[in-house]
Amino acid sequence: MSEEFTIRTFSSDEALVKERRNHIVRCSTKVFTKKGYDRTNMRELVKVCEMSAGTLYHYFGSKEEILYSIINSATSQQAGSMEDWANELATASPTIALVELMRKFYEWHDDNQNMTLFAYQETKNLPDNARQSIFDSEARILAVFEQLLTRGIEGGEFNIDDPKLIAHDIVVLGHAWALRRWHLRKHWTFKTYVKKQTDAMLRAITADKNTAVANKQRKESSK
């Protein structure tokens, strides 16, 4: 088992480290997403962060560590938000909860389109243990959908043989809005895309005997 990926620092002031790292991450994200990780060097990051090389290296040991912080921060925050939203919807019917969670998940990727694309393109540049940490956050998001789908199966609302695979399908469709925006936005608005994908998913997974009830619940949730 590989060791946990860690970020080097020479400061014991946790508040200062957090503040400086957040600043470096914000500035570096702009450069990385514009030029690409491979085409960006530390001199450019020092310049855009408006600090000396010594100061930057005080909080990050390498460009690789900055890349990890950017992607890991985004994925872990998203996972936390999805878990919080799922908890808020714990008493809602599985159909209503799924519609709402899909909307929130897709909205996140609409709001963070560049980050979604960046993560897909650049995660490969991280070492195995760093990638695993990011994959763990992604697994938390998948688990939210899988658990909800399983609850729907147990309650008789969903007819699914493999909730894990359906959870992957939902996540990939959310990512697609960012990854294929160059094509999708020519034909559909974000609101229309979400509605069409949600309707198609419900048609595919709703138990036949509950179709009418599920459709009614969905309409009520959208009012």
Image (cartoon, grey):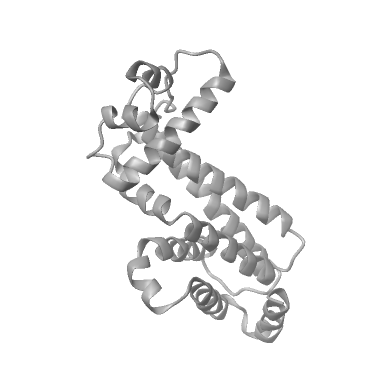
Q: Is residue 119 left or right of residue 98?
A: left
Q: Is residue 158 left or right of residue 189?
A: right
Residue in the picture at 67% in, 56% down: 86
**Residue 126 screen position, x and y as percent:** 33, 36
In the rendered image, the vertical position of residue 22 relative to residue 87, given as above or below: above
Instruction: Report whether residue 44 is seen.
Output: yes
Quadrant, the C terminus? bottom right
Number of numbered discs overlaid on the protein picture: 0
Query: In the figure, residue 38 lies in which quadrant?
Result: top left
In the rendered image, the vertical position of residue 5 relative to residue 177, given as above or below: above
**Residue 3 screen position, x and y as percent:** 41, 25
In the rendered image, the vertical position of residue 10 relative to residue 34, given as above or below: above
Q: Nearer the viewer, residue 52 or 162?
A: 52
Query: In the figure, residue 29 lies in which quadrant?
Result: top left
Quadrant, the N terminus? top left
Q: Nearer the viewer, residue 209 or 51?
A: 51
**Residue 84 screen position, x and y as percent:** 67, 50
Q: Nearer the viewer, residue 94 or 69?
A: 69
Instruction: Report whether residue 69 is seen.
Output: no
In the rendered image, the vertical position of residue 85 relative to residue 72, given as above or below: below
Q: Is residue 207 left or right of residue 178?
A: right
Q: Nearer the viewer, residue 147 or 125?
A: 125
**Residue 158 screen position, x and y as percent:** 62, 73
Q: Residue furthest right?
A: 91
Residue in the picture at 60% in, 45% down: 80
Residue in the picture at 64% in, 66% down: 100
Query: In the figure, residue 123 lies in which quadrant?
Result: top left
Residue in the picture at 71% in, 83% down: 216
